[in-house]
Image: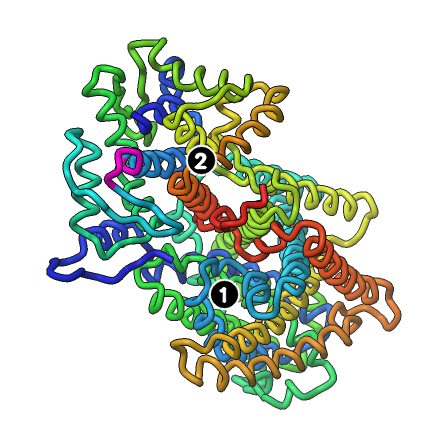
Amino acid sequence: MLTRESGGPGHGPDRIAGALAANRLGAPSVVYFVMSAAAPLTVVAGVLPTAIAATGITGLPIAFIAIGLVLALFSVGYVAMARHMANAGAFYTYISRGLGRPAGVPAAWVAILAYNGLAVGAFFMLGVQTSALLEGWLGAAIPWWAFALLAWAVVAALGVLRVDVNGKLLAVLLTAEVAIILLFNLGDLINPSPAGLTLETLSPGLLFTEGVAPLIVIATLGFVGFEAAVVFSEESREPRRTVPLATYASVAIIAGLYALSAWALSVATGPANLVAAAQKDGPEMIFVLGGAHFGGVVVDIARVLFITSLLAACISFHNTIARYLFALGRERIIPDAFGRTSLRTGAPRTASIAQSTLALVVILAVWLLGADPIQAFFVGGATGGAGVLLLLFVTAVAVIAFFAREPGGESLWHRLIAPVPAALILAVMAFIAFTNFEALLGVPEGDPLAMIIPIVYAAVAVIGVVWALILRSTQPGVYALVGMGAKAATAKESAR
Amino acid sequence: MLADELFLIAWDTTGSGKPRLHVQGIALGLAGALLAELVMRGRVAVQDSLVKVTDGRAVDERVSDRVLTDMAESPQHTDVRTWLAYLAQRSVTEVSGRLIREGRLEREAPKLLKRRTSRYYSPDFGHAMWPRTRLHMALVRGQPLAAHDMALAVLVDSCGMTEIVVDDPAERKIARRYLTTVLAALPRPLSDLGRHVNAAVGDAVLTYRS
């Protein structure tokens, strides 16, 4: 942790702290970063209609609000624990610290798997959307996989070359995305179906029905990225204020924006016709509705923004995974080649290439097997959402365990009153999600896919635990570094 | 001077004039070198993650004295990482400036909006190549290193430049093995400093904002 006490004995304003703060982030910058990784248009235009179509759920508006509240409650302990972490990087660092290293290693694997579901899934939607847009413009049908591979090449190159995608450009795109979402919502709300401005999809009763599993996972999926604010603890101007503020603000903005969007969709079609409309139009849904209200030009702008949003999501998840692998490489839990960077650019080269290779294999497999890319997008997203939900639950438990041992300096509210109900609710949510994978993926009972994904998660977790235990007995020096990230280098017992 | 030699290894001053390593890594490495210079002159003490001035007398060298003055004026900041982050903001300018004043380096300012980093060229090929050549020979042949060169080796390694010094992959294994022995023999303050530079360079990767 960087010290930031201002003004020593007999000194004026702290010049050192001032010079360091000049380069640091305020809460709005952190929120912008989190939101651009969350890629709102990807969720609103991509995830909402495909989820409704695949699973027949209508309760997303209330689900976003409910999950937002749960995650806000979760964040109380999460940001409090971040203050006590030298390396507040990722879920697995919390889990290692709170529940011990044998839990931390599997958590890291589960996270890598979950984020890969999201990272790879986005390429499919991107390919389909670009293909559809260009077909409308040029009249020629170029297959989806061509654009998926093109986007893959762009992401892979950016990952290794670390070309700065201009932060201002990302901010402009994000602002435009949010503006177009709000515009479309407005269009939906002033042109309601005969059912009128119905609040039916905001009824909490929808959360206590059989179809709740997909609601939970899809809504959680929408929030992915909010956990990243803590990464900037050391980069923010006042970590004690900036990081919590940015985390709560991100959760509130995401909950509000997505609940509004999902509700607007149900108002435009009428709750009774929502599923049928989503099944008919799929990811075209918001553009079909928007086109009816605003005409072709606005829709074309929205379509282009949807594609840039998907690309931003691909880049962001790629970087998240590369950083995970880099941190694990620095800890030497995986070969230390993953902890090396490209000389010229400082990009985590090996880690980046590893993620790109995996993405390429999956894209090629879906193409060559002739699978439906939209379904692949949804399966990737649902898999990722379920994995993140699992991590949220285990992290919530880790927060409680950590403060039970080291209560120092935090109030009962931060240590216990908020974290315990958050952990209980997340436990129920994760249980429902993992015992209802058929409903979650919208596949028939007994479909192998619904079996395979939970089994893969379980296998990865078991291998992680075994890996941790092997490290403990054979390489205690490395075992001691679990969860330290780049700060593994400062450990006294060097494991070189 | 330690930082000067690190600069000459990190920057291709005899060819393209461009950095060989990403500039953030160079800046942190040079910040570590500026601290290491003061450690070796007995002005500053490093222990674990703490650093403090033990002897505030000037060393009669502009760049080092400015670091020393800053540290003496802000004794409330004792974290090595704070000073690395602070000094990294100006280390490239300060160290290149020192070389330029000695006539060892020439700077070509960035052309308009084309580039963000300056190019630096050495008028004296031998002087520019010497640190890298010397370190390379010592590491590959397993020759004993003087205290100054041990410090240089640890800083080179901490900011990830070992592959620049030992550019032939066939030699790297031998060099790395010898380097491990060298690092084990390093005085604690310097090895602590090296670890913090390494962690700072790694954290810069983890918090990189795309």
The picture places residue A447, in percent across and down from the top left corner, at 86, 66
The picture places residue B91, in percent across and down from the top left corner, at 28, 35
* Residue segment shown in magenta: B38-43
Taking depth in this image into account, of A481 and A322 the one nearest to the observer is: A481
State whether residue A363 appears in this view: yes
Instruction: Kindly identify which numbered label has been placed on residue A157.
Output: none
Horizontally, residue B108 falls left or right of residue B6, namely left
| Outermost residue toward the right in this view | A446
Give the mark toward the camera: 2 or 1: 2
Horizontally, residue A478 falls left or right of residue A347, namely right
Tell me if residue B100 is in the magenta stretch.
Answer: no
Under mark 1, the amino acid is Phe
Taking depth in this image into account, of A177 and A122 the one nearest to the observer is: A122
The picture places residue A408, in percent across and down from the top left corner, at 42, 76
Name the chain under label 2. B
Q: Residues within 10 Å of mark 1 (few under 14, many from 20)?
A: many
Taking depth in this image into account, of A295 and B91 the one nearest to the observer is: B91
The residue that disc 2 covers is B186
Q: Residues within 10 Å of mark 2 (few under 14, many from 20)?
A: some
Q: Element at badge 2?
A: loop
Query: Which residue is depicted at the point 50% across and 58% down?
Result: A89
Query: Which residue is depicted at the point 38% across and 76% down?
Result: A409
In this view, A148 is above or below A469: above
The quadrant where residue A147 appears: top right
The quadrant where residue A93 appears: bottom right
Query: Which residue is depicted at the point 49% across and 19% down?
Result: B138
